[in-house]
Amino acid sequence: MQQQISVVTLGVADHVRSKRFYGEGFGWTPVFEAPGIVFYQMNGLMLGLWATNELKGDMKRPGSVKPGAFALAHNVRRKEEVQPLLDRLASAGGRILRPADAPPHGGFRGYVADPDDHAWEVAWNPAWPIDEHGHVTWGV
Amino acid sequence: MQQQISVVTLGVADHVRSKRFYGEGFGWTPVFEAPGIVFYQMNGLMLGLWATNELKGDMKRPGSVKPGAFALAHNVRRKEEVQPLLDRLASAGGRILRPADAPPHGGFRGYVADPDDHAWEVAWNPAWPIDEHGHVTWGV
C-alpha cells in the first residue's frame, strides 16, 4: 500500500472566516469552492475545509470535537520566516498558541490555531529539504 | 506562500499499538523511530505519530482532545480496494466508523478510526488522479 495521504479535511463552522485565514494568512488560493466545501491543491494532496456538521455526518461520528489531538505543519525555508508568518496568520483570524522558539530537537517553530481551533505548526527544519514542488523529504 | 503541508502529526498513546495499525493495516514502514515518536515518509510530506502528552506540551495546548473534527484520507486506485483495506485496518486495531458506500458526490468510501480514534477515510475517487509517486491532483 503506497505511503500516501490524499486529503486532509478540517471541519469548519464559517467558510468566509476560514478562507480569510487560509487566503490572507497563508496566501493560498482554492482550486474548488461550493457551498459548504473548499479545496486547496497542496503538495501532492488536497486540503479540504468542510462544514463540520457535514463532515461529522459523512464519517458517522457526531461526537467529534475541537481542538483535536493533532497538528498540521507548514515548513518554511528560512528561520526568519517563521514568526512573521505566525503573526500574519494571527492577523487573518488565527490565534497564537506558541510564539516561535527553538525546540530541543532543533530547528525553530511556533503554533497557531486556525479559526476553528485546528492547530498549525509553522516550522523551519533545516534537516528536511523542501523541493520546488513543495515536497518534503526525510533527512537528518 | 507555497500551498504545502509538511507534516501531519497525530497524538498517540501507545506506539506499539499504532505501529501495528499503520504497519499491518496500511503496510507502511517508518523512516525513523525514537522513543515517543515515529515518522513515515509520505507523498511529499511526513506523517508523525507523537506521544500525545509531548505533542500537547509542544503546541502549548493541554486541552486537546480526541476524536478531533477532522479526517485524513487515503485514496486507492480501484473501487474494489476500499472495503478490503477498511477490513484490514480494523483487523490491525482500527474500528470501522462507516462501511464503504457511495457518497452523493461520487466515488466510493468508508471510514475507520485508528487506535487513538483519529479518523481515516479510505476512498476511491476516479476524478482525482494519483501519480506513480502518490501525488494526488485535483480533477473533475
Image (cartoon, coloured by chain):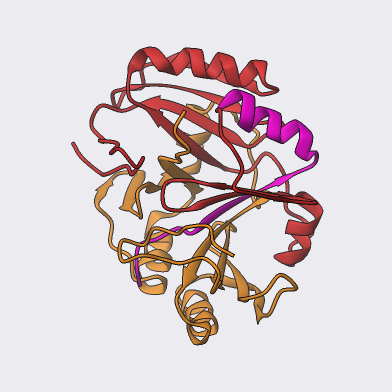
Chain colours: A red, B orange
Q: Is residue A138 left or right of residue B73?
A: left
| Quadrant holding the N terminus of chain A | bottom left
What x and y, as percent, mark residue A19? 69, 34
Does the magenta run of residues contain A14? yes
Q: In the picture shown, does residue B27 fall above or below B118?
A: below
Query: Range of the magenta residues?
Result: A1-26
Does the magenta run of residues contain B31? no
Q: In the image as oriented, which residue stretches furthest toward the front?
A: B140
Q: Residue at x 34, y 71 (%)?
A: B27
Q: In the picture shown, does residue B109 fall above or below A47?
A: below
| Quadrant holding the C terminus of chain A | top left
Observer-nearest residue: B128 or B25? B128
What x and y, as percent, mark residue B83? 55, 83
Q: Residue at x 49, y 85 (%)?
A: B84
What x and y, as percent, mark residue A116? 72, 36
Q: In the picture shown, does residue B111 fall above or below A138?
A: below
What x and y, as percent, mark residue B88? 46, 80
Q: In the image as oriented, which residue stretches furthest toward the left?
A: A140
Q: Residue at x 54, y 74 (%)?
A: B126
Q: In the picture shown, does residue B133 fall above or below A42?
A: below
